[in-house]
Amino acid sequence: MARIYVSIGSNIEPLRYIRASLFDIEQHYGTLMLSSIYESKAIGFRGDNFYNLIAAFDTDMDVHTVAHTLRTIEKNNGRQRTDNRFSARTLDLDILLYDDLILKDNEIEVPREEILKYAFVLLPLSEIAPTLKHPVIGQSYAELWQTFDKKDQSLWRVNL
């Protein structure tokens, strides 16, 4: 059984699409562990603010099957993939971690480099997995968040 951590983000009707994705993910994988939801400005383009959170779950499925399932959930929730990586989206689901697997191929990168680059990924990950260690760096997510340069990436908790 593998523990999976998935980043969930949206800036088009974010509450609608985040709720729908959580329902769909839970239908496939069962009980979810969830971080708080955080709001942040769009990075890399001008657009509405994003809502982001992290969901964790356990599965016997291999990493490629999980990635395919998440892409299907995105598509079913109106996600349109374009060549422009930085754009508005109904739903963005990215596998951040698959146990301690280290893999980079045409489909998947785990651990995702976004963990170390973006506050909206690292903060919620450090919230639900503070003592878990990054499989490459070997530091806990709480330690990584503590030393993260937060001055250029502000975010705030969304109270629902």
Image (cartoon, rainbow, N blue to C red):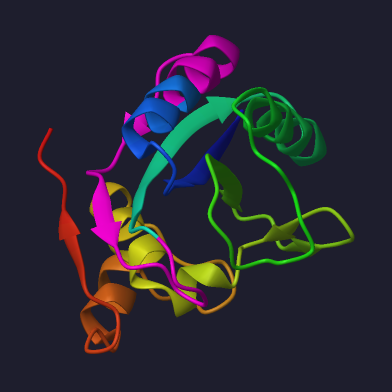
| Percent x, y of residue 15 | 32, 32
Q: Quadrant of residue 32?
A: top left
Q: Is residue 117 left or right of residue 41?
A: right
Q: What residue is shown at x 58% (from left), y 62% (from top)?
A: 87
**Left/right of residue 78 with respect to residue 102 in the rendered view:** left
Whether residue 31 is visible, yes or no, is yes
Q: Quadrant of the N terminus?
A: top right
Residue 25 is inside the magenta segment: yes
The percent coordinates of residue 133 (x first, y second) are 43, 65
Q: Is residue 79 above or below residue 132?
A: above
Seen in the picture, residue 94 relative to 118 is either above or below; the reply is above
Residue at 48%, 30% (x, y): give it.
Answer: 57
Estimate the x, y position of residue 30 in percent, counting from the top left. Answer: 48, 14
Residue 160 placed where, x, y %?
A: 13, 32
Residue that sits furthest to the right in the current view:
106
Count of number-bearing discs: 0
**On screen, residue 18 above or below 155:** above
Considering depth in this image, is 65 or 92 the residue closer to the camera?
92
Residue 98 in view here = no
Task: Name the residue nearer the viewer: 21 or 6.
Answer: 21
The residue range painted magenta reads 22-47
Residue extending furthest toward the left = 159
114 or 57: which is nearer to us? 114
Quarter occupied by residue 91: top right
Q: Is 158 colored magenta in this rendering?
A: no
Residue at the location (25% across, 45% down)?
Answer: 37
Q: Is residue 4 left or right of residue 47?
A: right
Q: Residue at x 41, y 67 (%)?
A: 42
